[in-house]
Image (cartoon, rainbow, N blue to C red):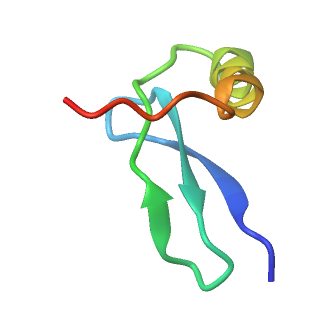
């Protein structure tokens, strides 16, 4: 089963997203809070486009 993006509203009424594995486990923690649903969807799109990034050890 494929993973999925979960879009939800937080306790202050903002929109957030997180990535869940096919088994329902959260694999990418919650995003920042967006004031609009479209802003959160743009955030998901940005993460998807930039996911092929270099690994840097800190």
Q: Position of residue 9 (x, y in %)?
A: 50, 40
Where residue 3 sits in the image (x, y, percent)?
72, 67
Q: In this view, does 52 lie above or below 40?
A: below
Q: Is residue 52 above or below residue 26?
A: above
Specify whether 43 is left or right of 4: left
Tell whether 42 sits left or right of 14: right
Tell me what residue is drawn at x 61 percent, y 72 percent.
21
Kindly identify the residue that appears in the image at 68 percent across and 79 percent down: 22
In terms of depth relative to the viewer, which is nearer, 27 or 16? 27
Image point 19% across, 29% down: which residue?
58
> Which residue is nearer to you in this view: 32 or 50?
50
Q: Residue at x 60, y 28 (%)?
A: 53
Count of numbered tags: 0
Q: In the visual, does 4 lie left or right of 20?
A: right
Q: Is residue 19 depicted above or below 7 in this figure?
A: below
Q: Position of residue 33 (x, y in %)?
A: 42, 24
Residue 49 quadrant: top right
> Which quarter of the image is occupied by the N terminus?
bottom right
Q: Where is residue 29 in the image (x, y as percent from the top left)?
A: 39, 49
Q: Quadrant of residue 43?
A: top right
Q: Is residue 47 left or right of residue 26?
A: right
């Amino acid at each position: 089963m494929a993973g999925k993006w979960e879009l939800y509203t937080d306790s202050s009424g903002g929109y957030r997203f997180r990535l869940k594995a096919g088994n329902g486990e959260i694999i990418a923690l919650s995003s920042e809070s967006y004031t609009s649903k479209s802003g959160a969807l743009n955030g998901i799109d940005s993460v998807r486009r930039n996911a092929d990034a270099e690994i840097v050890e800190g």
